[in-house]
Amino acid sequence: MSNALITTFRAARRRVSSPHLIDLGWHQKEFQRKTSFAYTVMGLDEKECLGCMYIYPSSNSEYDAEIVMWVRQSEVENG
């Protein structure tokens, strides 16, 4: 794994916390203000959360946005 990917992963882990109620409320506020966006990735039957995706303004002036996502380990193993 390249240093860039490791750095990106570590930064992502700091930015994405466990999905607590306060976090969900904050994501809703950010979405309403159009400052960042959070999406839940559901299974086809919409019964299980498989992961989440977050879109933030980029801290690098060369890019408009940064995308961070996570997926359940069981889904990584299933491909």
Image (spheres, rainbow, N blue to C red):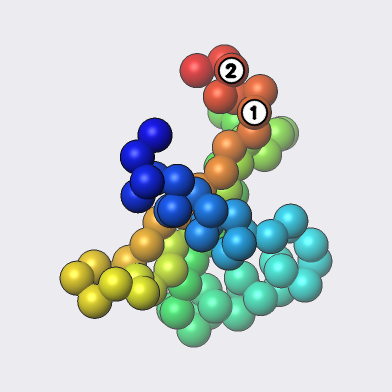
Q: Which residue is mark 2?
A: 77
* Left or right of 7 in this view: 13: right
- Residue 61 at what x, y percent from top left? 24, 76
Q: Is residue 61 visible?
A: yes
Q: Residues within 10 Å of mark 2 (few under 14, many from 20)?
A: few
Confirm or deny contact between disc 1 and disc 2 (CB under 8 A): yes
The correct choice, above or below, for 20 with respect to 58 in the image is above
Element under disc 1: helix
| Residue at image location 77% in from the left, 72% down from the top | 22
Residue 70, image x, y percentages: 56, 43
Q: CA distance from mark 1 to mark 2?
A: 6 Å
Residue labelled with disc 1: 73
48 above or below 8? above
Q: Quarter holding the N terminus? A: top left
> Who's the residue at 49% across and 84% down the image?
33
Q: Quadrant of residue 39?
A: bottom right
Q: 12 above or below 51?
A: below
Quick one: which residue is furthest to the front in this view?
3
- Tell me: residue 20, above or below residue 76: below
Q: What type is the residue that disc 2 sits on?
A: Glu
